[in-house]
Image (cartoon, helix red, strand yellow):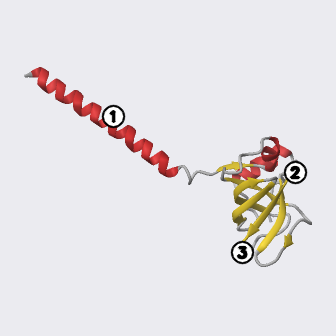
Amino acid sequence: MKSLKKRRRIQVILLAVVALALATGLIGYAMRDGINFFRAPSQIIAEPPQPSEVFRIGGLVEEGTLVRGEGETVRFSVTDGGESVPVVFTGVLPDLFAENQGMIGTGSYVNGVFEATEILAKHDETYMPKEVVDALKEQGVYQEAEES
C-alpha cells in the first residue's frame, strides 16, 4: 500500500516538473521577439551586431546631423560622446525630438546604419533613460541637470 502511494507521489512530482519546464520554454519562446537589449553607439562600433538582431540604441542626437528627407524619412546621428552611429527612420518623430537631446531608438544595424522602427524622445527637461545616462557617464559627457 505504501509503495503505491509513494509511486503516485513521485509521478505527480515528475509531471509537475515536466509541466513547469514546458511552460518556461513556451514563455521564453513567446518572448524572444519582445526582448530588446540596449547598446550605446560606442558598443555598436566596437562590436557590430548582426543585421537580423533587433535592439535599442540610445544617446544624444548629434548637432547638425538632423536631415529631413522626402516624405517621413529622417536621417540623423546618435552619439554617446565617444562614437556616432547614423540613424534612418521613416515615420513621425515625437514632438520633443531635437538635436542635443536624449533619445532611444528600436531597430537593427544594417550596413553601418541603424534602421529605426521606433523613436522615443525624453519627456521633460530633466528625464533621460537610465541606460543613456550610464552610457554618457561612461564616456565622460553627461552633466547633471541644474536645479532651479
Q: Which residue is mark 1?
A: 17
What amino acid type should be assigned to the residue bearing mark 2? Gly
Please provide percent x and percent y for residue 114: 77, 57
Q: Which element is circle 2 on?
A: loop
What amino acid type should be assigned to the residue bearing mark 3? Val
Q: Which residue is mark 2?
A: 81
Q: Which element is circle 1 on?
A: helix
Is residue 147 among what the camera can see? no
Residue at (80% x, 61% y) in the render = 87
User: Disc 2 vs disc 3: Cβ atoms closer than 8 Å?
Assistant: no
Mark 3 nearby-residue class (10 Å; few <14, some 14–19, many ≥20): few
Looking at the image, is mark 2 or mark 3 earlier in the sequence? Answer: 2
What amino acid type should be assigned to the residue bearing mark 1? Val
Residue 56 vs 17, above or below: the answer is: below
Q: Quadrant of the C terminus?
A: bottom right
Q: Which element is circle 3 on?
A: loop
Is residue 96 among what the camera can see? yes
Mark 2 nearby-residue class (10 Å; few <14, some 14–19, many ≥20): some
Looking at the image, is mark 3 or mark 1 earlier in the sequence? Answer: 1
Q: Quadrant of residue 129?
A: bottom right
Labelled disc at residue 92: 3
Q: Quadrant of residue 117?
A: bottom right
